[in-house]
Image: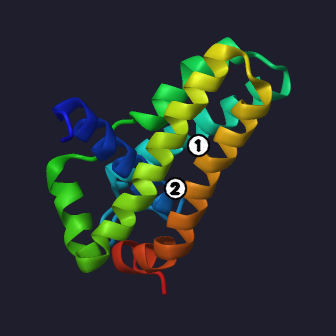
């Protein structure tokens, strides 16, 4: 049984994964000039992921430990935007959530490894975070951008 905290964390990770689909200048809402909230969330995730990379390079495990929860429990888009995205995903929402869960779980492992000062496991956990991001991007990004940003 999931706790509401666990469900919230998973939904937050889902939002982060979605945002990564649209990060960058192409993430303007179709027909409007305002970017989707997901773009802002993904840009923050990008900064956090880059900061983790820098912290790993200098073996700053406390900094990795500070950043990992930000990755696993990032902000989410507003409910209306989230529903729009989930509606678009349709039957693929489960696959999307699977990538989200992978990123969430890997970020938790990253925090745990950093707390132990286990550099090898920090790197392995960070690789799992990146694999979750990449898998989601490969499965959804191109279609997402085409659907929400008019690029085909």
Q: Are marks 1 and 2 in contact (CB under 8 Å)?
A: yes
Residue 24 visible in the snapshot:
no
Residue linked to disc 1: 46
- Give the SS element for disc 1: helix
User: What distance separates the C-alpha of mark 1 from that of mark 2?
Assistant: 8 Å
Name the residue rendered at 78%, 26% in the picture.
Answer: 119
Residue 121 against residue 40 in the figure, above or below: above
Q: Position of residue 12 (x, y in %)?
A: 33, 41
Q: Of 68 and 114, which appears nearest the observer?
A: 114
Residue linked to disc 2: 23
Name the residue rendered at 75%, 16% in the picture.
Answer: 60
**Rendering quarter of residue 95:** bottom left
Residue 95 against residue 39 in the figure, above or below: below
- Give the SS element for disc 2: loop
Residue 76 against residue 20 in the figure, above or below: above
Q: Of all residues shown, which one is farthest toward the bottom?
A: 152
Q: Which mark is residue 98?
A: none
How many C-alpha atoms fall within 10 Å of the one at disc 2: few (<14), some, or many (≥20)? many
Q: Position of residue 144 (x, y in %)?
A: 41, 73
How many C-alpha atoms fall within 10 Å of the one at disc 1: few (<14), some, or many (≥20)? some
Answer with left or right where residue 135 lies relative to residue 28: right
Q: Position of residue 120 (x, y in %)?
A: 79, 32
Answer with left or right where residue 94 lies relative to residue 141: left
Name the residue rendered at 47%, 81% in the picture.
Answer: 151
Image quadrant where one finds the N terminus: top left
**Rendering quarter of residue 109:** top right
């Amino acid at each position: 049984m999931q706790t509401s905290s666990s469900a919230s964390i998973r939904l937050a990770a889902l939002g982060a994964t979605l945002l990564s689909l649209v990060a960058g200048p192409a993430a303007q809402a179709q027909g409007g000039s305002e970017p989707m909230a997901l773009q802002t969330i993904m840009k923050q995730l990008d900064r956090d992921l880059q900061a983790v990379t820098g912290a790993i390079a200098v073996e700053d495990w406390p900094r990795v430990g500070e950043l990992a929860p930000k990755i696993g429990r990032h902000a989410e888009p507003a409910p209306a935007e989230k529903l729009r995205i989930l509606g678009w995903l349709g039957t693929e929402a489960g696959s999307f959530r699977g990538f989200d869960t992978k990123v969430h779980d890997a970020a938790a492992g990253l925090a745990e490894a950093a707390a132990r000062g286990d550099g090898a496991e920090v790197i392995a956990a960070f690789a799992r975070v990146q694999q979750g991001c990449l898998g989601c991007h490969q499965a959804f990004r191109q279609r997402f951008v085409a659907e929400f940003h008019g690029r085909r």
